[in-house]
Image (cartoon, rainbow, N blue to C red):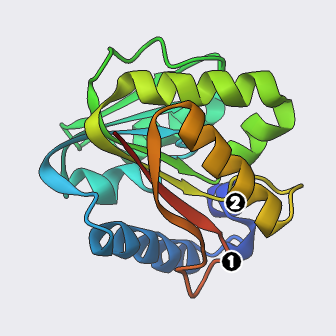
Amino acid sequence: MARSEAASVALYSLGSAEVLAAATAEVVQVLVDWGVLGTERDALEVGCGIGRLLGPLSLRLRSIVGIDLSPGMIDAARRRTRDDANVTVLTTDGRDLSAIADGAMDLVLGIDSLPYIVRAGAELVRSTFAEIHRVLRPHGDLVLCNYSYGHSRPDAAMEVARLAEEHALVVVRSDVAPFRLWNAIAYHLRRA
């Protein structure tokens, strides 16, 4: 991160702030197209990193909370969003969402953060999905960009579908590649 914040959160940017900004705008546009944003909605970004999405999303949400376990990333996110009154950035231990109240969120985002949770083991994945269900309001949305780096696309899609069923989430979109600049595989789930 010391050399390039852009590359630390999106290697495909090759450290270019311009490429990262374009990719960020593309993510925001997909979220707009999917109808998950709105100025009456509260959101949580799990693994917010340097906060590259927090500022742009804050313009389209009532509030957004970014959490990460890296103090360096959190410092960068706070610096980037210091003028955004509806953004809160919190350091967590990465084990749960205990800093977030039950039913407090209309949207939970996992933008390239779930692969690290998956890598930590099935128990953490299940508890993360349980926590996401807990913090989502009824009919709230969960958007994941990249579930796992180690699963094939069909296996990842099956696992996400299984987790959705176990945690009372409905699959709206599965295994889609909506981006031009980034090869992420996206999922859109909704709390029943």
Position of residue 2 measured from the top left corner of the image (x, y, whole percent): 73, 48
Tell me the number on the disc at residue 157. 2
Mark 1: amino acid: Asn
Q: Is residue 12 left or right of residue 91?
A: right
Q: Is residue 79 above or below residue 9?
A: above
Q: Residue at x 68, y 77 (%)?
A: 183
Q: Judge whether residue 68 can be spotted in this image.
A: no
- Tally of marks: 2
Q: Looking at the picture, how far across and down is residue 4, in whole percent? A: 69, 59
Q: Quadrant of the C terminus?
A: top left
User: Residue 120: percent from the left, percent from the top?
Assistant: 83, 30
CA distance for labels 1 and 2: 16 Å
Up/down of 145 relative to 27, above or below: above
Q: Residues within 10 Å of mark 2 (few under 14, many from 20)?
A: many
Residue 151 numbered tag: none
Q: Which image quadrant for residue 146?
A: bottom right
Q: Quadrant of residue 72?
A: top right
- Give the residue drawn at x 81%, y 59%: 155
Q: Is residue 178 above or below residue 68?
A: below
User: Is residue 92 visible to the viewer in this orientation of the structure?
Assistant: yes
Q: Residue at x 55, y 72 (%)?
A: 20
Q: Residue at x 75, y 47 (%)?
A: 115
- Give the residue type at disc 2: Ala
Question: Which residue was labeled with disc 1?
Answer: 183
